[in-house]
Image (cartoon, rainbow, N blue to C red):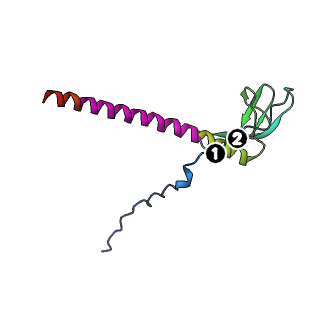
Amino acid sequence: MAKKKAIFPPPPKPIPVEALRWTDPVAPDVPPPSSSQDLSKGFLPNSYSMRVEPACSSAVSHAFGRDDSTTSQGSRHLFSTRLLALRAMRHDVEKEAAAKLAAIDERIADEIASVDSRAEVQKEKS
């Protein structure tokens, strides 16, 4: 009888150290049109879904994922190229990650202070 081989998931790829860097902010370079009948076209990033999609904007509404008509309220400044939108998304994710790391660092510092104060109390009792 043939022995079954165990199937294991591939090992995780190491995170390249080069990924931990700061990049410059990138501003949208396509303003919404002044007329609600006109459409500006470009790209918008979504940092939550990690997607960059074609987009359009009028003076009062916009669309994400299409550039032929608007679907959502509110005009948006767009990026003229997918590359600019990707760079802007990367910068947004950097800021989000830095904020999360800062919050963790604060909790670590609080825990260290708590442990140190308990050690001091224990030392005084001895």
Disc 2, SS: loop
Nearer to me, 47 or 90: 90
Please check the rendered image and state whether residue 108 is part of the magenta-colored stretch, yes or no. yes
Instruction: Specify the segment rendered in magenta.
Output: 93-118
Nearer to me, 50 or 28: 28
Residue 35 rendering spot, x and y as whole percentages: 87, 26
Name the residue rendered at 39%, 33% in the picture: 107
Report the disc number at residue 87.
none
Distance between mark 2 and mark 1 Cα atoms: 9 Å
46 left or right of 61? left
94 left or right of 86? left
The quadrant of the image that shows the N terminus is bottom left
Q: Where is residue 29, by image quadrant?
A: top right
Report the disc number at residue 23.
1
Name the residue rendered at 86%, 27% in the picture: 34
Name the residue rendered at 76%, 46% in the picture: 81
Q: Where is residue 116, by image quadrant?
A: top left
Residue 32 rendering spot, x and y as whole percentages: 80, 31
Disc 1, SS: loop
User: Hey, which residue is sitting farthest bottom in the picture?
Assistant: 1
The residue under label 1 is which amino acid type?
Thr
The residue under label 2 is which amino acid type?
Val
Q: Which residue is mark 2?
A: 26
Q: Decide: marks 2, 1 in contact (CB < 8 A)? A: no
Please check the rendered image and state whether residue 75 is part of the magenta-colored stretch, yes or no. no
The quadrant of the image that shows the C terminus is top left
